[in-house]
Image (cartoon, grey):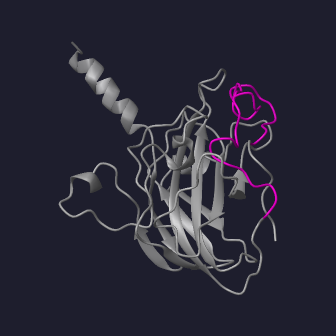
Amino acid sequence: MKTFATLLASVGLVAAHGYVDNATIGGQFYQFYQPYQDPYMGTAPERISRKIPGNGPVEDLTSLAIQCNADSAPAKLHAPAAAGSTVTLRWTLWPESHMGPVITYMARCPDSGCQNWTPSASDKVWFKVKEGGRTGTSNVWAATPLMTAPANYEYTIPSCLKPGYYLVRHEIIALHAAYMYPGAQFYPGCHQLQVTGSGTKTPSTNLVSFPGAYKSTDPGITVDAYKAATYTIPGPAVFTC
């Protein structure tokens, strides 16, 4: 039987993790899926973000959960956003011990929308739109600004993107236990956009699948993050217009 102290410690461990709570997109506020509230409501709110099971990590790189989190399912709504505009994501406060990179990908959905579509494990449809790793060999990481409130992160929708529906995959990779595999902790989540504008490009190179984009032997996945060393961000090059 667990002692009261053990239970308290477990609660503290869970509370230490994070997820994207809300966003501002196209000047509009969007509440993201609330894992500790939405499943218990009589009528589930319609969201632009896909559901997540909680604030815990994914650790298996071969699992489909690495894509948008465990038990993810398409959301009903899309947020209108102009190509070239900036999206602000707000994380729940991130723990100081969980240093690591922050990476954002996009994938073009069918012309009918993202609400009935999930890429298969082998679909190479994801292109990277932003990445942040380590500042030199210091202990300053892309996740560091999310460790103090307000925990805001911004990415820009590529200005040349062809209008249409897009699925955004955004993650923090926590490296505090990544000296061996499994060890790195992945905190992915996905939200759905309807991109507008006059762009004409649909990325066709450096596309990856999830799972598949990362391997356990990648230097950015299995790494001693406590050593002062240059960090290699995993995944493909960032798409540029």
Q: Residue at x 70, y 24 (%)?
A: 224
- Give the residues drawn in magenta, as a range: 204-233
Residue at 77% across, 29% down: 228
Q: Name which quarter of the figure residue 166 lies in.
A: bottom right
Q: Quadrant of residue 101?
A: top right
Q: Is residue 17 visible?
A: yes
How far across and down, in percent of the image, does residue 232 sit?
79, 39
Q: Nearer the viewer, residue 107 or 137?
A: 107
Q: Residue at x 71, y 87 (%)?
A: 198
Residue in view at x 49 percent, y 44 percent: 94
Q: Position of residue 140 (x, y in %)?
A: 68, 42
Left/right of residue 221 with respect to residue 189 in the rendered view: right
Say which of 76 and 33 sits in front.
76
The answer to whether residue 2 is magenta is no
Q: Is residue 194 left or right of residue 213?
A: left
User: Can you tell which quarter of the image residue 106 is in?
Assistant: bottom right
**Can residue 232 be found in the magenta stretch?**
yes
Name above or below for residue 120 compared with residue 181.
below
State whether the magenta stretch is mostly helix, strand or loop: loop
